[in-house]
Amino acid sequence: MAEVPSTTSQWVIESPTGTAGLKLKHDVPLPALGPHDVLVKIHAVSLNARDNQIINNNYTWGVTPGVVPLSDGAGSFSFAQASTLPCAALTAWNALFCGSGGSVKPGDVVLTQGSGGVSLFAIQFARAAGATVIATTGRLGGEREARLRRLGAATVLSYREADWGQRAKAATAGGRGVDLVVETSGAGDQSAAALKLGGRIAVVGGVAGSGASTFDMRITLGELRRVAVGSRDQFEDMIRAIETNGIQPVVDEMVWRFDQAREAFEHAQSGKMLGKVVIRIAEEA
């Protein structure tokens, strides 16, 4: 039986000034285990938008120690891949399949935005459900567009075009509009412009400026729903779908060491990554 460690290393936020306020500390005492406690070894973590909000003191809720319910993960993934599932993947799953307006179904059209983790999972989940995907990216013709198409996007548009919302609507059969927008960019009015009559917009997390105007939503009779991660039951449903459909997490080619967390944050903030930014904490067993 392996010896239980008494200390660990950790990154702390010394001041809410972004990456400059992060400091790596070693030999930090671990709390004593109670009779019903377990010590979990973390192998890898992936960065999400909320992590940048936390280090800049912009997160809506306070950050306090707590208990996290655990679930089985997909069986064939590396720790780096598995680290992307509880936040980005689950948020995408919630956006597509868990709203009161119903689940994405075969024949639907789903619009995703950019090449962040939630969008990349949403493309794969939507395709597995039989939906057609329209995706956006900054520049056409590059590796980002190619990646989106490989994952299953039938149409890729540039969000640098002023009327990309209307272009997305025009790309649907008969110009009827998209059934669901996974809103991750803050372009609410563009999302509303793409929407079909009675369509839905799933607004992910605390995206700045993501509110489609009341006027636009009234025209479409659409539903606006905010999505923030998901429940344990939703997570377990998602894991079964991932295993059944062979869905693969997309991890950025650069996986960072634990002592490179500051650089990993800066890379995530740069927008240059292609996939989830992951920090490896322990080597693969």
Image (cartoon, rainbow, N blue to C red):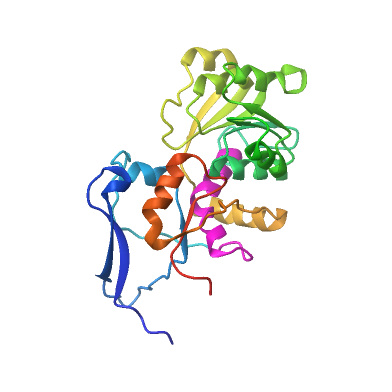
**Position of residue 282 in the picture relative to residue 35 (left or right):** right
Residue 261, position as x, y percentages in the image: 39, 55
Residue in the image at 50% along x and 23% along y: 188
Residue 248, position as x, y percentages in the image: 65, 54
Tell me the quarter of the image containing the N terminus: bottom left
**From what the image shows, is residue 87 above or below residue 166?**
below
**Position of residue 86 in the picture relative to residue 246 (left or right):** left
Residue 267, position as x, y percentages in the image: 45, 46
* Along the viewing direction, whichever of 2 and 8 lies nearer the viewer: 8
Snapshot quadrant of residue 29: bottom left
Among all residues in the image, which is located at the extreme bottom? 1
Snapshot quadrant of residue 28: bottom left
Residue 224, position as x, y percentages in the image: 51, 27
Magenta span main SS: helix
Please state the total of marks drawn on the protein image: 0
Residue in the image at 66% along x and 25% along y: 178
* Along the viewing direction, whichever of 199 and 102 lies nearer the viewer: 199
Q: Which residues are magenta?
A: 72-96
**Position of residue 167 in the picture relative to residue 182 (left or right):** right
Residue in the image at 54% along x and 25% along y: 223
**From what the image shows, is residue 159 above or below residue 204?**
above
**From what the image shows, is residue 163 above or below residue 252?**
above
Magenta residue check for 85 = yes
Magenta residue check for 28 = no
Residue 165 seen from this side: yes
* Along the viewing direction, whichever of 16 and 224 lies nearer the viewer: 16
Residue 94 seen from this side: no
* Along the viewing direction, whichever of 80 and 228 lies nearer the viewer: 80
**From what the image shows, is residue 166 above or below residue 88?**
above
Snapshot quadrant of residue 3: bottom left
